[in-house]
Image: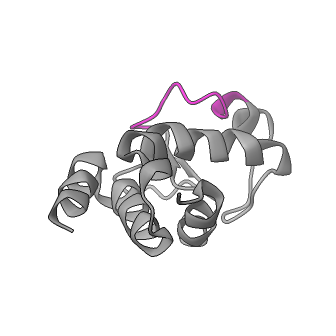
Amino acid sequence: MADFLTAYRITAKNEGGYVDDPNDLGGETYCGITRKNFPHWTGWPIVDQHKPIHTGSTLPQLELLVEDFYRNNFWNPVNGNTITDQDLANQVYDMAVNAGVGEALKLLNAS
């Protein structure tokens, strides 16, 4: 069975820290979590308490909330734990994060 943390750590390298770029359609973002798309994420109040935050910065107290967010919104919906090949699980999970769960499931079903 594939391991979530292995897949998460690979993808998380590309998700960065805090960004609030007015030219980014996603708007305010923390570790790849956009406030526009996920306004009810439980980490936003903590982010707000620590403003101003430098671009790229992360808050250690949010590490588990970020992991849980990615596990619940992307890993679990693609049933990552049931994939027996870790490399395939890494790709499907990354696709879920970057293109959506539906696209990732299409990739999985095509493999």
Residue at left offset 38%, top offset 40%: 77
**Residue 9: x %, y % from top left:** 63, 66
Say if residue 23 shows up in the picture. no
**In the image: residue 26, left or right of residue 71:** left
Name which quarter of the figure residue 62 lies in.
top right
Q: Residue at x 34, y 53 (%)?
A: 25
Q: Position of residue 58 (x, y in %)?
A: 75, 57
Occupied quadrant, residue 88: bottom left
Taken as a whole, is the magenta stretch helix, strand or loop? loop
| Rendering coords of residue 39 (x, y %) | 48, 29
Query: Which residue occupies 45% across, 62% down?
Result: 84
| Render colour scheme | one colour
Q: Is residue 32 visible?
A: yes
Q: Nearer the viewer, residue 6 or 36?
A: 6
Q: Which residues are magenta?
A: 36-45
* Residue 98 as seen in the image, left or right of residue 52: left
At 43% from the left edge and 46% from the top edge, which residue is drawn? 74
Q: Please count the marks in the image.
A: 0
Residue at the right extreme of this rendering: 60
Question: Is 101 or 60 nearer to us in this picture?
Answer: 101
Please identify the quarter of the rendering in which residue 109 is found.
Answer: bottom left
Q: Is residue 83 above or below residue 102?
A: below
- Magenta stretch encompasses residue 71: no
Image location of residue 70, percent across then percent down: 54, 46
Q: Nearer the viewer, residue 43 or 75?
A: 75
Q: Is residue 38 magenta?
A: yes
**Quarter of the image where the C terminus is located:** bottom left
Specify whether 83 is left or right of 103. right
